[in-house]
Image (spheres, grey):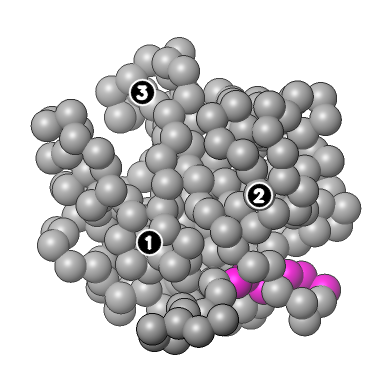
Amino acid sequence: MNYVFAPPPTVSAPVTGTAARFAVHRIYCVGSNYLAHAQEMGRTGREPPVFFMKPADALLPVEAGETGVMPYPSLTANLHYEVELVVAIGVGGRDIEPARSLDHVFGYAVGLDMTRRDLQAEMKKRSAPWCIGKAFDHAAPLGPITPRGQAGAIEGAEIALRVEGVERQRSRIDQMIWSVPEILAHLSAAWTLTPGDLIFTGTPAGVGPVARGERMEGTCSGLETLRVQVS
Ligand code: MN
């Protein structure tokens, strides 16, 4: 194939226990998926799921044991962290039944749905899309993906975020409004899931700002820790 310019490189994330990489296709995100966070954002938590996307090349993959560096983004004075369980799709499909949905999951990782909250709030006020608040460069830091069989029972896992060593978010995956099987069912009714898709499944309560120079540490039991410093 002949291109008028060199095609962009394939975006990929590390996988625990192998040198082979997870090639990323799309990044889907679920809006407010924990009751306490839905309430802190002014909703009841009983609304149907909200999905949005980030471009695949917004991914900031962080290798095991390393600290990723995220440049402070332009246009914002209120960059927020949102720690999230990320589902990595290994087998594609559409209209996936919740009972069979885990067959489609390659593995799990800890991710950060970084948000220009001031711009997102402005877009919400105008009933306009959130892209400028959510889908900017480096907006999706991601730790290594742990294959499903090695991750243990993710439903009971604890998820947490520390900023500069101080705990800011903590919850359990079973506190999600929409479980992983339910998310996969809803998402695959709207889009055909493809190997390489990543799904950020929503953040617990406690979101807040992060400043230049600050270090974030996202954890989820059974998964690799994600460390990111804002520069
Ligand atoms: Mn989020």
Q: Of residues 170 and 22, which is closer to you in this image?
A: 22
Mark 3, residue position? 39
In the picture, the disc for residue 111 is none
Q: Position of residue 102 (x, y in %)?
A: 79, 38
Q: CA distance from mark 2 to mark 3?
A: 32 Å
Say what secondary structure mark 3 lies in.
helix
Say which amino acid is labelled 3: Gln
Mark 1 in CB contact with mark 2 (< 8 angstroms): no
Say which amino acid is labelled 2: Thr
Mark 1, residue position? 139
Q: Position of residue 90 (x, y in %)?
A: 75, 53
Residue drawn 37% across and 61% down? 139
Q: Quadrant of the N terminus?
A: bottom right
Task: Tell me if residue 170 can be seen.
Answer: no
Q: Main secondary structure of the magenta part?
A: strand
Q: Quadrant of the C terminus?
A: bottom left
Q: Earlier in the sequence, mark 1 or mark 2?
A: 1
Task: Tell me if residue 198 can be seen.
Answer: yes
Mark 2, residue position? 194
Q: Earlier in the sequence, mark 2 or mark 3?
A: 3
- Magenta stretch encompasses residue 121: no
Question: Disc 2 or disc 3, which is closer to the eye?
Answer: 2
Q: Earlier in the sequence, mark 3 or mark 1?
A: 3
Q: Of residues 161 and 127, which is closer to you in this image?
A: 127
Residue drawn 69% across and 54% down? 195
Magenta-colored span: 12-17
Q: Is residue 122 above or below residue 57?
A: above
Determine whether, in the image, residue 155 is placed left or right of residue 184.
right
Say what secondary structure mark 1 lies in.
loop
Q: Of residues 14 and 223, which is closer to you in this image?
A: 14
